[in-house]
Image (cartoon, grey):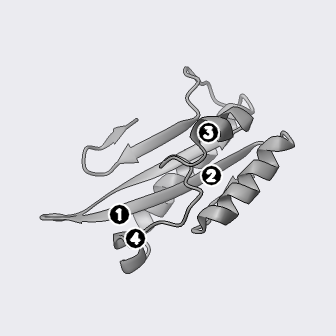
Amino acid sequence: MFVSVDDGPARKLIVDWLSARGIPYVDCGMGLDRSLVGLSGFVRITGTDRKAYDDNAGSARLPIENAKENEYRKQAQITELNAMKAVMAVIRFKQHFKLLDRLDEATSYVFDTATMEME
């Protein structure tokens, strides 16, 4: 199951329900901020099980409250960031089902557009 909602309380209900029932999920999102030279942002994915929920619920990696006003709410959808989070989510889902190799046990990944680094 792929989850991508802009409402934190709805995200909490959906992901809590899925993970409590053992239904694999990947939640994905993004954020944008304006800097002196342009936009900077991040793309994140979190999932696929109860441990991912327990480790991340209420953090920036799995927000359960609505975001404050930021550039994400002011800008048109950022196509390339939506595409990136979709690709990351599919890769993580395939890892869960052992279609792709996985070398770590991280429950969340964040890609930063300013540094081009994945955490």
Would you say 22 lies left or right of 35 here? right
The disc placed on residue 50 is none
Q: Is residue 84 visible?
A: yes
Say if mark 4 contacts mark 1, CB within 8 Å.
yes
The disc placed on residue 32 is 1
Would you say 77 lies left or right of 26 here? left
Amino acid type at image mark 1: Leu
Disc 3 is placed on an element classified as: helix
Of callouts 4 and 1, which one flags the residue occurring earlier in the amino acid sequence?
1
Question: Is 88 rendered above or below residue 54?
Answer: below
The disc placed on residue 27 is 2
Of callouts 2 and 4, which one flags the residue occurring earlier in the amino acid sequence?
2
Nearer mark to the viewer, of 4 and 3:
4
Identify which residue, 19 or 4, lies in the foreground. Answer: 19
* Whole-number angstrom distance, CA of label 4 to CA of label 1: 5 Å
- What's the residue at 56%, 61% (across, down)? 65
Q: Is disc 3 surrounded by few (<14), some (14 to 19) or many (20+) residues within 10 Å?
A: many
Q: Is disc 1 surrounded by few (<14), some (14 to 19) or many (20+) residues within 10 Å?
A: some
Say if mark 2 contacts mark 3, CB within 8 Å.
no
Of all residues, the one furthest to the top in this rendering is: 103
Of callouts 1 and 2, which one flags the residue occurring earlier in the amino acid sequence?
2
Question: Is 67 rendered above or below residue 57?
Answer: below
Place residue 55 in its image quadrant. Answer: top right
- What's the residue at 75%, 33% (across, down)? 97
Disc 4 is placed on an element classified as: helix
- What's the residue at 62%, 65% (across, down)? 5
Circle 4 sits on which residue?
A: 72
* Whole-number angstrom distance, CA of label 4 to CA of label 3: 24 Å
Circle 3 sits on which residue?
A: 92
Question: Looking at the image, how many numbered discs can be counted on the residues?
Answer: 4
Question: Is 105 rendered above or below residue 96?
Answer: above
* Whole-number angstrom distance, CA of label 1 to CA of label 2: 17 Å
